Image (cartoon, grey):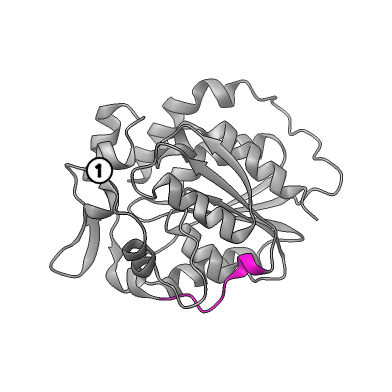
Amino acid sequence: MRNLLLSVATILMAGATGAAPAQAAQLPKGAARNVVLVHGAFVDQTSWKPVADILTKKGYNVTLVENPLTSLAADVDATKQALAKQNGKTVLVGHSWGGVVITQAGDDPKVSALVYVSAFAPDVGQSLATLAKSGPATEGTAAIHPDEKGNLYIDPKVFPSAVAADLPPEIAEALASHQLPLNHTAFEAPVDTAAWRDKPTLYVISTKDKVVAPEVQKMFATMMHAQTTEVAGSHASLVVHAKEVAEAIEKATLVN
């Protein structure tokens, strides 16, 4: 999975990252220098590589969290370990399932702002399962099934159209066949903290998302009083629209 996603990121972002200056730019005065990126289910941290490359070239200190995907507690612990290594203000970003993780982990005093990218945003007492049942069914969520061990996957036949319709078909199919499972206990675990209640929040809405319905994303953003950015992308917009996602994160670094 790691090599596959690195290859995908390199191919898709060759033009965008190549245009960046060789030396790190001077960050705006007062900007948070640190950015911690939390990935979603079924992929690993390299799904954030296109965004990380853009931000790193601009001088930000970027950390990619490696979620074990074995439980909410384990993923929150991995995120908190990453936050503990930051020096100063930090923007915490989550994609998809990563939104649940940053909701729980984002109460860290170093976190100056939260950014949700096509992400679930539970309130206290809500789980991913709760949100999935309460919102409109989507092609992606309907295709999530457990194996005999209780690990969750998206049906590989549905994955390309539901998750990554704007990626080249051969890449989407390869990602579908190399999924990393999410344990069912993570799916069912409620959060007991909603960091967005106390932190400035931004939300990147993917208007062609077939996993988290765009109207649900807008509902989350409204609930959180989040600043919003819209991109005409699928659930994989963090790759396909990395430039716009990176720009939204940069806005969050300026929030006081």
On whether residue 78 falls in the magenta region, the answer is: no
Q: Is residue 136 above or below residue 186?
A: above
Residue at image mark 1: 159
Identify the residue at horizontal 55%, vertical 66% (top origin).
Answer: 103
Q: Is residue 174 above or below residue 220?
A: above
Q: Position of residue 66 (x, y in %)?
A: 46, 58
Local SS, label 1: helix
Q: Position of residue 175 (x, y in %)?
A: 28, 41
Q: Is residue 113 left or right of residue 213?
A: right
Identify the residue at horizontal 57%, vertical 41% (top origin).
Answer: 52
Task: Work out which residue is located at the far right of the displayed protein and give it.
Answer: 29
Task: Work out which residue is located at the far left of the displayed protein and give it.
Answer: 148
What secondary structure predominates along the stretch shown in magenta? loop
Query: Is residue 37 among the parts visible in the rendering?
Result: no
Q: Position of residue 34 (x, y in %)?
A: 69, 53
Identify the residue at horizontal 75%, vertical 59% (top origin).
Answer: 89
Q: Position of residue 216 (x, y in %)?
A: 44, 52
Identify the residue at horizontal 47%, vertical 58% (top origin).
Answer: 98
Task: State the extent of the magenta-drawn residues as a range.
Answer: 190-197
Name the quarter where the C terminus is drawn.
Answer: bottom right
